[in-house]
Image (cartoon, rainbow, N blue to C red):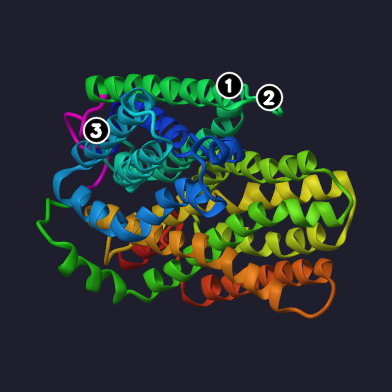
């Protein structure tokens, strides 16, 4: 236990962060149970490509529907209870999916069970993820919260990065495999993911604590306020409205880059495996950036420059990937773009918790709204990019290049929005304000 001003910082915070981070990572395994083997699942269940894709898309879609409510619940009852609700949903979804092949032999019935459980699991993920910043607010001192936000976000990104190859490896479905082999591979994936989620849940309920014996930093008194009351309060802030737009653009750029990569690299004459490597490089860069940049933000005491950097660097990174057919250059551009783009998420969450009009008490509600808006971007922007490409009259390569140009323009808009409308909330500015008032 270390002394920091009038607050005490407890070493147990790392235990709480570890078990919560484990939940954030493993929940992605459940969401990704079908995506890496989508073609095989489609064949096994005798469904069309849209139905197969829905198994992956229904999870992110739930963020649009329930993230704001989940954040409001966290602000009212605490992070452990609200995230615990999500953990229970995830465990139930994992168990039912693992049992589904043994409960019915009907492919149609299995599909609808899987879809229902992906919906339930996606809802559970929302209740867990809205606490990305709420847990650090409870357990970490004020000057370390951006760093802790970066670690919780890194756990989420790490789950995505590991989950994709993990599912493929566990399934071990070879080219031309028959339905029996596909079924066996899928069953292994569902069973292993169920066991991992149950283990993560057990550790969470055993070791997670709502808050330390004494506060780690300034936290206002509890405030009973419904989403109906808190949402207008959030939207009255020009900074928060700007962060909503930035979240929508940022999510849209990240998802659009990853889903478009196969086509762009194909036009460059590169293989699908290299396209996956570039897309994975974006996420890997984001993981490393989330571990590093929020901590640097704490050291220099500023938040806003990192949001500007995230958008500014991605303008050339996107254009390089669109127009330069060079393997090392494209791979490096994807990595650097992800390194600065994805850490913008925890830094944005930190800003929300530091805003006077929102602060720690309504932080989870703010995060929930940002996740909901960002999820709209992650669904809408890729669809708009596809429509944009199809409506062009020139050759297909130019179409997708123009789609990426649009994304670069979106990044430029984000720079202007942050520069003009986002107010700096970092410790450096707060210190200047306090000394000037003194």
Which numbered circle lies on residue 174? Answer: 2
Q: Secondary structure at mark 3?
A: helix
Q: Residue 99 in the image: x percent, y percent?
A: 33, 24
Q: CA distance from mark 3 to mark 1?
A: 31 Å
From the viewer's perspective, tell me whether residue 240 is left or right of residue 268.
left
Q: In this rendering, is residue 211 above or below 299?
A: above
Q: Residue furthest front?
A: 106
Q: Between disc 3 and disc 2, whose residue precedes? A: 3
Image quarter hosting the N terminus: top left
Q: Could you tell me which quadrant the C terminus lies in?
A: bottom left
Camera-near label (2 vs 1) is 1
- Is residue 7 left or right of 283 when viewed as pictured? left
Circle 1 crowding by C-alpha within 10 Å: few under 14, some 14–19, many from 20: some
Residue 88 numbered mark, or none = 3
Residue 181 disc label:
1
**Residue 287 against residue 167 in the figure, above or below:** below
From what the image shows, is residue 170 above or below residue 240? above
Q: Which range of residues does the magenta coloring cover?
A: 208-219
Indicate whether residue 288 is drawn in magenta. Answer: no
């Amino acid at each position: 236990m270390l002394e920091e001003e009038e607050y005490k910082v407890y070493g147990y915070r790392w235990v709480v962060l570890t078990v919560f981070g484990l939940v954030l990572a493993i929940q992605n395994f459940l969401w990704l149970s079908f995506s890496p083997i989508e073609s095989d699942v489609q064949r096994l269940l005798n469904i069309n490509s849209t139905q197969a894709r829905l198994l992956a898309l229904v999870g992110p879609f739930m963020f649009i529907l329930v993230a704001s409510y989940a954040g409001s619940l966290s602000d009212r009852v605490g992070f452990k209870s609200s995230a615990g609700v999500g953990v229970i949903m995830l465990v139930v979804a994992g168990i039912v999916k693992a049992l589904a092949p043994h409960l019915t032999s009907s492919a149609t019935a299995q599909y609808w069970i899987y879809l229902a459980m992906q919906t339930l699991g996606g809802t559970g993920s929302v209740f867990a993820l809205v606490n990305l910043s709420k847990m650090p607010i409870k357990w970490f001192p004020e000057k370390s919260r951006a760093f802790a936000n970066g670690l919780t976000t890194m756990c989420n990104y790490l789950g995505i990065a590991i989950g994709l190859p993990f599912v493929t490896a566990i399934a071990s479905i070879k080219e031309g495999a028959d339905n029996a082999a596909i079924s066996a591979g899928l069953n292994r994936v569902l069973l292993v993911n169920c066991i991992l989620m149950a283990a993560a849940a057990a550790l969470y309920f055993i070791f997670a604590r709502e808050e330390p014996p004494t506060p780690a930093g300034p936290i206002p008194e509890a405030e009973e306020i419904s989403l109906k009351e808190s949402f207008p309060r959030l939207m009255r802030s020009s900074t928060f409205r700007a962060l909503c737009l930035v979240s929508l653009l940022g999510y849209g750029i990240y998802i659009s880059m990853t889903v478009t990569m196969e086509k762009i690299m194909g036009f460059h004459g590169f293989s699908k495996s290299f396209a996956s490597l570039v897309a994975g490089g974006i996420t890997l860069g984001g993981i490393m950036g989330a571990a590093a940049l929020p901590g640097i933000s704490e050291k220099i005491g500023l938040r806003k420059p990192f949001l500007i950097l995230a958008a500014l660097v991605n303008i050339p990174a996107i254009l390089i990937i669109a127009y330069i057919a060079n393997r090392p250059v494209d791979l490096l551009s994807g990595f650097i773009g992800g390194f600065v783009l994805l850490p913008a998420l925890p830094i944005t969450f930190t800003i929300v918790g530091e805003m006077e009009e929102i602060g720690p008490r309504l932080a989870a509600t703010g995060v929930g709204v940002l996740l909901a808006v960002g999820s709209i971007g992650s669904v809408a922007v890729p669809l708009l990019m596809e429509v944009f490409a199809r409506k062009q009259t020139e050759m297909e390569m130019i179409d997708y290049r123009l789609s990426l140009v649009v994304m670069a323009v979106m990044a430029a808009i984000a720079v202007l929005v942050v520069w003009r409308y986002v107010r700096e909330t970092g410790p450096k500015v707060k210190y200047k304000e306090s000394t000037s008032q003194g």
